[in-house]
Image (cartoon, helix red, strand yellow):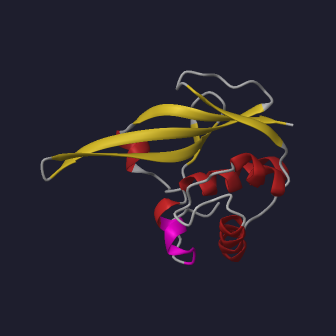
Amino acid sequence: MIVQQDPFLKPLIQKFGCYFMCILFIVNRYKHRGFDRKIINDLYDFFVGLDWMEKDCYVKHPCEIFNYLGLPVSSIRVEGSDYICDPDEVEILKFERSYERKGETITYGHFVCGNGCGVVTYDPSGVSNAVRLGYLESKRVFTRG
């Protein structure tokens, strides 16, 4: 799968596209649908145009995106980091990392895909500092079907 920093992807995807790229990875996994760089960029424009996603890749309507891409999803909810998914559920994990810079604490989140038990299966950044040095803050759990 393509990582979000791929130089042929739009700059805002490169910088903020982790959640969006996780959705594409999950659709690829369950529907065997490939996404090349052009398709990813075109889908970004399409979803921003529909107002399902902001230009900064903030995903406003993930269920609609999943459904449009051919993976029926009926609901999303936020669960704690210890939640174990049922067989009809898929998870996107939210990691958080804090660090000090110039006397200020900076905290940021990063989304990756999990196996249903909190184990990372795809990191849109390849090997992110959020996963390596941060902690699993919560899960976005989607019910398929």
Image: magenta residue range: 8-14
Magenta stretch: includes residue 83: no
- Residue 77, image x, y percentages: 66, 32
Relative to 54, residue 75 above or below: above
Residue 32 shows in this picture: no
Q: Quadrant of the C terminus?
A: top right
Locate residue 3 relative to residue 127 in the image: left or right: right
Residue that extends furthest to the left in the rendered view of this protein: 103
Residue 119 sits in quarter: top right
Residue 73 sits in quarter: top right
Residue 90 shows in this picture: yes
Q: Quadrant of the N terminus?
A: bottom right
Relative to 66, residue 38 above or below: below
Comparing 126 with 134, the one in front is 134
Comparing 118 with 71, the one in front is 71
The residue under the point 75% across, 54% down is: 65
- Residue 122, image x, y percentages: 59, 48
The residue under the point 54% across, 50% down is: 123
Residue that extends furthest to the front in the rendered view of this protein: 51
Count of numbered circles in the view? 0
Relative to 12, residue 93 above or below: above
The residue under the point 72% across, 65% down is: 50
Locate residue 107 relative to residue 75 in the image: left or right: left
- Residue 39, image x, y percentages: 73, 72
- Residue 51, image x, y percentages: 67, 62
Locate residue 87 relative to residue 123 in the image: left or right: right
The residue under the point 46% across, 39% down is: 95
